[in-house]
């Protein structure tokens, strides 16, 4: 097969993924959304979510435009880049934003339809929730492969990519796509994270704790904002996160593939392009297996929904591994030799397959560790429950301890994976491991997005005051996804680490630096500063949540005291506490019903939106500006130190915060069934439960705002470095030489560029 | 002057410091300890503290013996080491342990004497507390300089240190001293930290919160353990910490000084030894200025005690800077040239002086930033107070945010210092910056130790039921030291960072590796694992505090319910709540008095001691074993990655945890004077205050156990690496060559060793 055929085929895989999302999306939309009240509530959620996206995209449009201009100008100045990098950037941003839009659009349709299906049974509800998630999942991978594929197709007609120097330019221009995706992802994750937790903390602290009304109760003015938050944070945010990893891993691998082009063995396969095209082909085929897997998720009424999800996820993984083997063997030469330091090392295509599998296995293992440290009833979570007996302080200390401890094994897994993947395929092996981990993103993300959809479905059931069994069915759906969601988190962190490393290696290659020597003070300084950024970034995120939650609390309190209908309803609720509503006096029932819809949900939605938009800017700029500043002021080695620092502490802080938050969450949930502490049984509303609620509230911004944002931070910074690599690489050599003799500077620049080619 | 004269003089400086401590110690002991009850309480504290030291040193003796045997054997196998490294190690451990013993011995005498002096006025009380602290401070620096000096004197008679290869052996053997000091320091910090916080949390949660008795009340069985904890944690622990930094910085600088020996310019000065001896001379002279400074601390009755402390500290700093200039100019050649990469760089003695000053300035600046983020009434602390209005959860989130944010500026200061010091003096400049920062350790530590002595004095006043003005005087003393103590913390962290870097550079030189390239997967894996260790280590420490505190709580509860006299006294206290004791019924007064001394303090002391000893072992072994394992299994470059990782995240986590803890502490304290939140005034026992107490309790293990232990972790690991550097350096070359041809292995080893000399 000719390489041009492959390049032609790649966008087709993407289109298949997108076709699937349209079909599924239409299927979800065709389902019955339920009664008038449900439709009204769902509409509020959907409108809130879209209002947020709109506000967010308006701000981002300006950002994208400004960065595109800078990029385009800078690209046009470099021999190894081109102004088209700006076009890639805009297109990447557009695809990422579209992925968020598609996912949220279907999620806000699927939620109410899941609720409605849950009125009659579990099977159909599961199907709707899962297919809603599948739209998100396939949308992300479809847009990723389509976007990269179509750009490559176009650029391969502008340049002759079978020549190393022209291919280098094309791939650098392609990194712009990854940069665009990352930028949107960062803002979406941070903004969405701030939104969802401000609403959540606000709704919980005033609604549940102060006013004593249940979660998702229609009397709580922040309840719509809370449900909107699940969509903008957990659906759109997670989608953007994995879109970024997905694209980043592919692009990083393509860059490293350039280095293999001219090796004997490669030159005969696809004009030397096999290593460059491999990640795209693997990802494209991954779309097919994800579609296949999503059809495996089916459960008969009374069947086990957990098994259904597992069948889909693990089934498609197994198929993907088998197919990967044949693809790798087919595309790459059987063996080749490379100079590594002073020795010549032989690599094989089977080795690359092993590297690919290492990535997938590492992802699953990290997920299982995550599950162990955060799952209901596990030893670490039980230890937090036990410490709740002596109050909030000991609960918090225990949770922080569990979070910190939980970093150990995942880090060892990552370390071993790096060494193993490198052994089998050098730096390219590490990158392929990241691709392997992410080849299943479609189905993985489907399961991830299924969670918040079920969660939302439960919220709508509560707000519409449907019979209790509906809520309990949606709770069951929600619980089913827990293990798979934990694995999803493991994948998100693990893939962020490997993708960042792939991009990091790509950066060193592109910047032409042979060594990032931490015993050099500039590099060490970069390492320190890079290591510090995730702390600063987390602080910004948490501060933002704190401030926004405070505004939310003030607003909810205001509504409770100034809206007469709400005030009256709260009073009768308190008066009749513990009594079923049927047994209330007629008058009280009427007062209560009169309050329905009187809460001004829109105000709370607005507060969350404004806070999120305003507060996402600073951390976003920090992430983009710091590698640029360090790169131009301190040179590529210091920038390398910065990236290494941000990668290491970013991964650590992400694991620490996500797992501490998850463990606190489930420690609190364990009280619902009752827990035993020192021989005594405790339930909800006991003192230990109250302590556990404090822990859960602390964990909220940890696990849903700052923690996951770090995944993106480290990838984004690596992408930025990769994009500016050609500029700082040349600049560095310039300065050195310039010190010797400034007069022949112009001539020298020419030489330097040539020697890089 | 001949170099042998200098080597002869150095121990004399140390002896002067030690003489000063004996004179001051005797002076403190001569002061009046007060009435019989005070003496009895002080005796309980002193006995508890000594019992802990004894138990701790018994365990450590075994550890020291085992490690010494391994070290001695390993040293005897290497050409660049010697079995005497074991002797240095034992002596270092002994000096470190003695420093802890001397400091705690005087502190447990000074506390009660300060209380007694505070019965009549402030001036004498300040003097006693400060001189008690000065014994600790001068004891540490005296033992450090004496220990290193006397060993160097002895070894310089065994080897001819004017020859580079023999000097290399001597200095490697000397690093054993630093290793010994570090080992004891780690166990002392971790053990002391666990002890003090287990007792503190236990005493607070049951005594203050549950039983409602004031802090340090004689009815609280954990109160003696709590006061013992201040001594073993804040006095002995802090002393061991700075002893380690002090010795580590000197040794690291000496190692790097070897590299300058044979440069033109150096050969004429002190037979090439000037750069090697400079850190010892600077430290020796620092002892004199510290003694001078401690005599400047004097305050007349009614004078300003803060100014007295400042005069002592900043006065001696100024003198030290002036003297440093003349010493450096005198000892080092005016200028010299070195090959750095491809260029020849000229360095000057004035430049080395600048590097020295950079260290001192960086220490002060980091201290001021610490003060800003943790001081009473500053913006960050106020923000935590404000968030206490909405409960414990928002207080915790705010505190975590402040702690994370507070890492930014200190890290930038460290980064700039590294670059600046390197600019002025290459790697040697970085090491000299660490020495500069630490040259004032004597007086700095005096001020640090003054704090817990005043704190203890207050506790004794409370337990002896002295009039309220005594307690308020000791509180004033305690408060005065706050700013200086914050600066002390800044020094501890800053010096740990610079010392670790100096040791790190020394390691790379000794291991003979030219580059620690993080784009190599083994190095990156090392970086990840190293970065993870401070998280794991912190988790162990916090878990230990949690478990020990739980045991303590159970014991205090048991005593309250099973000791009849205590039970009765608590009942009459509750009955008469809010009434002055004089107004109680005669019978109640008698019941209350009968309970005096009935609490079984010893049991609580025992629980803390056992928990601390048992729980300090695991983290200690982790710190020592991991560099050894990685070094031998992964080679020196991977070990370099490990060190870089542990240094960066160690410093970050130390700043984060210390500052978050400090900020929570002072946020809580602000309620004593009353604070305004959203226009309303709140005092102690209000709901926001209760939220702030939760924050403070979470912060306790952060700021007093895990945070400060990290300072030692990173230095200890670097020292271990430095000690084993000769072994792994040779091993690495061996393995490479061995792969080629195993038969001529023996002969080759000989060649490798020679080429290293």
Image (cartoon, coloured by chain):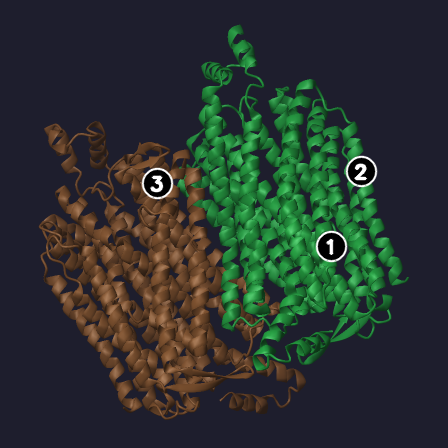
Chain colours: A brown, B green
Viewer-closest of A111 and A553: A111
Secondary structure at badge 3 equals: helix
Disc 2: which residue: B22
Q: Quadrant of residue A572?
A: top left
The chain carrying label 1 is B
Q: For the view shown, which residue lies furthest in the top direction? A: B586
Disc 3: which residue: A693
Q: Is residue B360 visible?
A: no
Q: Determine whether B534 is above or below B118 in the image.
A: below
Instruction: Find residue A22 and report its horizontal and vertical position in percent.
Output: 17, 70
Give the side of residue A401 with respect to residue A458, left or right.
right
Disc 1: which residue: B88
Image quadrant holding the N terminus of chain A, namely bottom left
The chain carrying label 2 is B
The chain carrying label 3 is A
Q: Quadrant of residue A434?
A: bottom left
Q: Say the numbered circle drawn on residue A425.
A: none
Give the side of residue B348 with respect to residue A49, left or right.
right
């Amino acid at each position: 097969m000719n390489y041009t055929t492959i390049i032609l085929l790649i966008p087709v895989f993407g289109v298949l993924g997108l076709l699937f999302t349209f079909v599924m999306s239409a299927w979800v939309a065709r389902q019955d959304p339920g009664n008038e009240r449900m439709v009204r509530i769902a509409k509020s959620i959907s409108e809130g979510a879209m209002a947020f996206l709109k506000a967010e995209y308006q701000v981002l449009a300006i950002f994208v435009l400004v960065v595109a201009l800078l990029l385009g100008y800078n690209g046009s100045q470099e021999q190894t880049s081109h102004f088209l990098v700006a076009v890639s950037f805009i297109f990447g941003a557009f695809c990422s934003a579209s992925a968020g839009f598609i996912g949220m659009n279907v999620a806000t349709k699927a939620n109410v339809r899941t609720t409605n299906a849950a009125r009659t049974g579990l099977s159909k509800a599961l199907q709707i929730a899962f297919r809603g998630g599948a739209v998100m999942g396939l949308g992300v991978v479809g847009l990723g492969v389509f976007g990269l594929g179509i750009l490559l197709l176009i650029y391969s007609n502008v340049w002759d990519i079978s020549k190393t120097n022209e291919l280098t330019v094309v791939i650098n221009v392609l990194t712009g796509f990854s940069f665009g995706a990352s930028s949107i992802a960062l803002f979406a994750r941070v903004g969405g994270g701030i939104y969802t937790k401000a609403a959540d903390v606000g709704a919980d602290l005033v609604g549940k704790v102060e006013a004593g009304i249940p979660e998702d109760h229609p009397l709580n003015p922040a309840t719509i904002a809370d449900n909107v938050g699940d969509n903008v944070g957990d659906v759109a945010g997670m989608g953007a996160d994995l879109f970024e990893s997905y694209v980043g891993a592919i692009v990083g691998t393509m860059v490293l593939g350039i280095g293999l082009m001219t090796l004997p063995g490669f030159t005969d396969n696809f004009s030397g392009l096999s290593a460059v095209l491999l990640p795209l082909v693997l990802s494209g085929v991954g779309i097919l297996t994800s579609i296949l897997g999503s059809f495996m998720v089916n459960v008969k009424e009374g069947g086990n929904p957990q098994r259904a999800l597992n069948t889909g996820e693990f089934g498609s993984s197994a198929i993907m591994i088998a197919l990967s083997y044949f693809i790798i063997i087919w595309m790459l030469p059987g063996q080749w030799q490379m100079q590594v330091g002073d020795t010549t090392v032989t690599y094989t295509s089977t080795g690359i397959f092993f590297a690919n599998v290492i990535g997938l296995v590492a992802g699953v293992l990290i997920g299982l560790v995550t599950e162990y440290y955060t799952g209901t009833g596990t030893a670490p979570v039980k230890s937090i429950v036990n410490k709740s007996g002596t109050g909030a302080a000991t609960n918090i200390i225990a949770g922080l301890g569990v979070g910190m401890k939980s970093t150990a094994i995942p880090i060892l897994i990552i370390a071993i994976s790096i060494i193993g993947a490198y052994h089998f395929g050098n730096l390219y092996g590490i990158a392929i491991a990241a691709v392997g981990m992410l080849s299943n993103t479609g189905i993985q993300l489907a399961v991830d997005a299924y969670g918040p959809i079920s969660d939302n479905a439960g919220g709508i059931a509560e707000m519409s005051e449907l019979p209790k069994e509906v809520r309990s069915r949606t709770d069951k759906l929600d619980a089913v996804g827990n293990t798979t969601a934990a694995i999803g988190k493991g994948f998100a962190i693990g893939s962020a680490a490997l993708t960042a490393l792939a991009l990091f290696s790509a950066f060193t290659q592109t910047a032409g630096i042979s060594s990032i020597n931490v015993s050099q003070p500039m590099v060490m300084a970069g390492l320190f500063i890079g290591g510090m950024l995730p702390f600063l970034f987390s602080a910004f995120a948490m501060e933002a949540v704190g401030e926004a939650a405070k505004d939310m609390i003030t607003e909810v309190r205001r509504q409770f005291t100034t809206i007469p209908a709400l005030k009256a309803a709260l009073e009768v609720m308190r008066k009749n506490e513990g009594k079923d509503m049927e047994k209330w006096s007629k008058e009280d029932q009427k007062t209560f019903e009169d309050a329905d819809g009187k809460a001004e949900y829109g105000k709370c939605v607005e507060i969350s939106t404004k806070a999120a938009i305003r507060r996402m800017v600073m951390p976003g700029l920090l992430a983009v500006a710091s590698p640029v500043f360090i790169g131009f002021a301190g040179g590529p080695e210091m920038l390398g130190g910065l990236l290494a620092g941000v990668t290491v502490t970013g991964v650590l802080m992400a694991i620490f915060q996500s797992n501490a938050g998850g463990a606190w969450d489930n420690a609190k949930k364990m009280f619902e069934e009752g827990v035993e502490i020192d021989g005594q049984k405790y339930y909800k509303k006991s003192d230990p439960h109250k302590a556990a609620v404090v822990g859960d509230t602390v964990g909220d911004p940890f696990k849903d705002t700052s923690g996951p944002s770090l995944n993106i931070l480290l990838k984004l910074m690596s992408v930025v470095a990769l994009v500016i690599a050609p500029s700082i690489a040349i600049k560095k050599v310039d300065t050195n030489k310039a010190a010797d003799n400034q007069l022949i500077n112009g001539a020298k620049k020419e030489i330097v560029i040539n020697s890089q080619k």
